[in-house]
Amino acid sequence: MFLQRLGLRDYRNYREVDVTLEPGVTVFVGRNGQGKTNLVEALYLLASGKSHRISTTAPLILKDCERGVIRATVVAQDRALLCEWEINREAPDRIQMNGNASKSGDLARALSVVMFAPEDLTVVRGDPAQRRAHLDEIVSWLFPRIRGTLVDYERTLKQRNSLLKSLRTHSRSTPDTSTLDVWDEKLVSLGTDIFAARLATLALLAPRVSDRYRSIAGADHQPELAITPSVEIAPENFGDYATVFTQQLTAQRTVDIERGQTMAGPHRDDIAISLNALPAKGYASHGETWSLVLALRLAELDVKRREGPAGDPIVILDDVFAELDSGRRELLCQSLVDVEQVLVTAAVRDDVPASMVAQLITISGGAVVPTEEGAQT
Ligand SMILES: Nc1ncnc2c1ncn2[C@@H]1O[C@H](COP(=O)(O)OP(=O)(O)O)[C@@H](O)[C@H]1O
Ligand SMILES: [Mg+2]
């Protein structure tokens, strides 16, 4: 698929902009802080329901405005799809697809985007929460119903935790834990679905990460991706996850009440990323970490390309080339030659390898600048 037109109104540092794009590579060039990332972030927001930089939508609205609007026309298999997202400061957001009221999940299902960004380094180096968020985004794309399951799980977890806290404060003697049974049952049911969907996603992803990494770094390298469950369960027993999770919740009740927190469940799982049998976090060099990040995103591209009904995902490379050495730059270019559309942001054209033939669009101060630089190269 490809983005044919992107219109922004009162969004980030854009008052009003309307760009028409073509398949192939488009490079948005401009000095730092001009609005290049803001532009591609708008497409990412439509496709994933959130920004890759922030967790709330209020900062997306132009300063002092009540609402911001993103309007994108995406063409997939010769069919145009008009996606609109009105971000409101006070009222609920309004999302439409071809003029019909929709939800962010509907947009996410219709669009397919893979974004590479410097923030990706946190997938390898950051907290387990960042790795879970990375995986869950792909999980939600592959299994759309899990989007709701994740929300329900978080809500149930909060309710269970507040009950734990009230049991801690209110009954010093033997607490009546019968309502806890109800929350446990719900948590196990939702948690088991999440765990299974994550496993299924990793099963698709892991071999591709491995292949992609070796094509970047050489055949003698062996990256591995595996879920580290907080529920104590060996991989050969993953089929009994619900039973083991229930047993553990029951066994750990006293500890959970003492801490006022649920100590086991998918919300505390990690995804272990290792390289040649050493954990990537703490061991991998800067270059190796970037190779891992590229392999993770390229594997996501492979999965979305294979599983997606609407063809190639749109690939976004946000300020990525400036982070890579020339070898990795070339490898990334080669890996993307046959992708239908690639949107690149860069401070200078020279950051992008010359081998990447591109349409150039100059961005300055929240506006598209119509200069000769904008011409085809
Ligand atoms: N809601 C907003 N209202 C006005 N300006 C904003 C808003 N959000 C971000 N900006 C501005 O956008 C600029 C950053 O744009 P960005 O796309 O990240 O730059 P770059 O071109 O380096 O990728 C900053 O100057 C920031 O102050
Ligand atoms: Mg940027």
Image: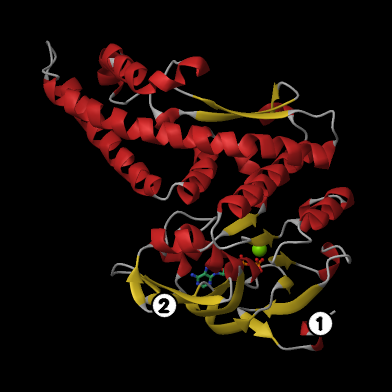
Pointer 1: residues within 10 angstroms few (<14), some, or many (20+)? few
Residue at (54, 35) in percent of width and height: 127
* Image coords of residue 4 (percent x, y): 60, 78
The disc label shown at residue 86, or none: none
Secondary structure under tag 2 reads loop
What's the colour scheme?
secondary structure
**Drawn side of residue 131 relative to residue 230, left or right:** right
Separation (CA) of disc 1 from disc 2: 31 Å
For discs 1 and 2, the disc positioned in front in the rendered view: 2
**Drawn side of residue 122 relative to residue 295, left or right:** left
349 or 137, nearer to the observer:
137
Circle 1 residue = 376
* Image coords of residue 333 (percent x, y): 81, 58
Residue 289 found in image quarter: top right
Residue 211 found in image quarter: top right
* Image coords of residue 54 (percent x, y): 49, 55
Pointer 2: residues within 10 angstroms few (<14), some, or many (20+)? few
Quarter containing the C terminus: bottom right
The quadrant of the picture showing ligand 2 is bottom right
Note whether residue 161 is visible: yes
* Image coords of residue 214 (percent x, y): 80, 36
Secondary structure under tag 1 reads loop
Image height of 280 relative to 238, above or below: below
Note whether residue 125 is visible: no
Residue at (29, 31) in percent of width and height: 189
**Are the two marked residues, 1 and 2, in contact with CB atoms closer than 8 angstroms?**
no
Q: Three-letter amino acid code at disc 2?
A: Asn
Circle 2 residue = 98
